[in-house]
Image (cartoon, rainbow, N blue to C red):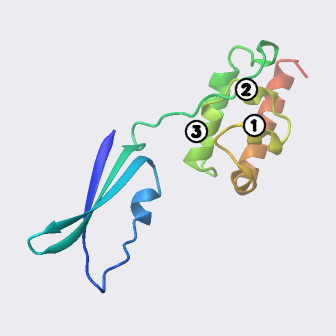
Amino acid sequence: MKIKTIKIKVTQSNQEFDLTEFFTGSNTIYTTNAQLIQEEDGLYWHAFFTYQQQGGNFQFPQKYSTSKEEKAPDGFEEALLEFIETKTNASVRTKNSIKCNLDNVYTFKKAEDFLKLKSLGKGSINKEKDFLLEVLEFIKKYKESKNEV
């Protein structure tokens, strides 16, 4: 966990401060705290944030679970992972959501089934629909090649 400290001088003309760049992207904010502190040259807001930077230390969300009967056959996860890596028309977040649930997407039959994944919502599904349909087509062809339709 990391700590970010921001010092803001209190003046009449400087009452707003935009932190959206820090809050967007790949930081997970755990706590925030602000204190007004009198220093020799004036009043300052000291803002403290504890956060986890997700960049190289990506933590996958908790897996979506299915029953044992619905688990993908051996080799499916590797084949789907290889397929996903070749695609450039999808966001990293969408790809990671699927990678985290490789064995479970085997049961998906339509794009709306991806809503079962904790990290994808309706907006993501609509935005990434072409990619998700390609994934579903891959799953269908994989099942046909294994004669499991």
Q: Is residue 92 above or below residue 99?
A: below
Name the residue furthest left.
40
Q: Identify which amino acid the numbered label 1 is placed on.
A: Lys
Numbered badge on residue 116: 1
User: How many angstroms separate mark 2 from mark 3 (CA)?
Assistant: 13 Å
Q: Identify which amino acid the numbered label 3 is placed on.
A: Asn
Contact between marks 3 and 1 (CB within 8 A): the answer is no
Q: Residue at x 81, y 44 (%)?
A: 111
The image position of residue 112, as x and y in percent, is 82, 44
Residue identified by numbered label 2: 104
The image position of residue 51, as x and y in percent, is 38, 45
- On screen, residue 84 versus residue 60, left or right, reads right
User: How many angstroms separate mark 3 from mark 1 (CA)?
Assistant: 14 Å
The image position of residue 10, as x and y in percent, is 26, 76
Q: Tag 1: Cα neighbours inside 10 Å, few (<14), some, or many (≥20)?
A: some
- On screen, residue 95 versus residue 121, left or right, reads left
Q: Identify which amino acid the numbered label 2 is placed on.
A: Asn
